[in-house]
Amino acid sequence: MATDVYEDSLFGQILPLDWDDETVSGVVLLVDGEEEFIVEPDENGESLIEYIDRWVTAEGVVVEDEDQLRIKVRSYTLEDEIDYDTDEDW
């Protein structure tokens, strides 16, 4: 199978990929409860470590090959954060 590279927007849950002692050293984006996209460990990818178990929409470049799915995150939005600053948000 050839490698596919494309830009996409993915919605999913951030989960730990690797542990270094008791510290998370990598994350995956679990999409539809079944597809795991390994998040590239660049600046944006590493910032997602603090959002384990949170739901996000991540935009970036996806690389698919026969062994794995990867995403290089350009930007992301936390989707489970609710702002109740005004009564209109209720």
Image: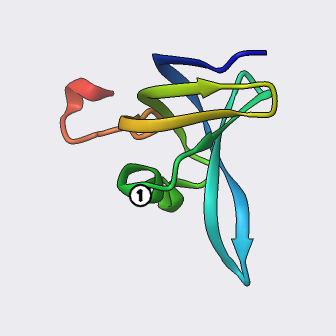
Q: Position of residue 35 (x, y in %)?
A: 75, 27
Q: How many marks?
A: 1
Rendered image quadrant of residue 52:
bottom right
* 56 and 1: which is toward the camera: 1
* 12 and 72: which is toward the camera: 72
x 72%, y 63%: residue: 18
* Mark 1: few/some/many CA within 10 Å (<14, 14-19, 20+): few
Quarter in which the N terminus is drawn = top right
x 58%, y 27%: residue: 63
Q: Report which residue position mark 1 lands on.
A: 47
Rendered image quadrant of residue 23:
bottom right
> Is 84 above or below relative to 89?
below
> Is 32 above or below relative to 83?
above
Quarter in which the C terminus is drawn = top left
Q: Position of residue 33 (x, y in %)?
A: 78, 27
Q: Residue furthest bottom?
A: 21
- Relative to residue 17, is residue 78 drawn left or right? left
Residue type of the residue flagged with mark 1: Ser
x 36%, y 56%: residue: 43
Rendered image quadrant of residue 3:
top right
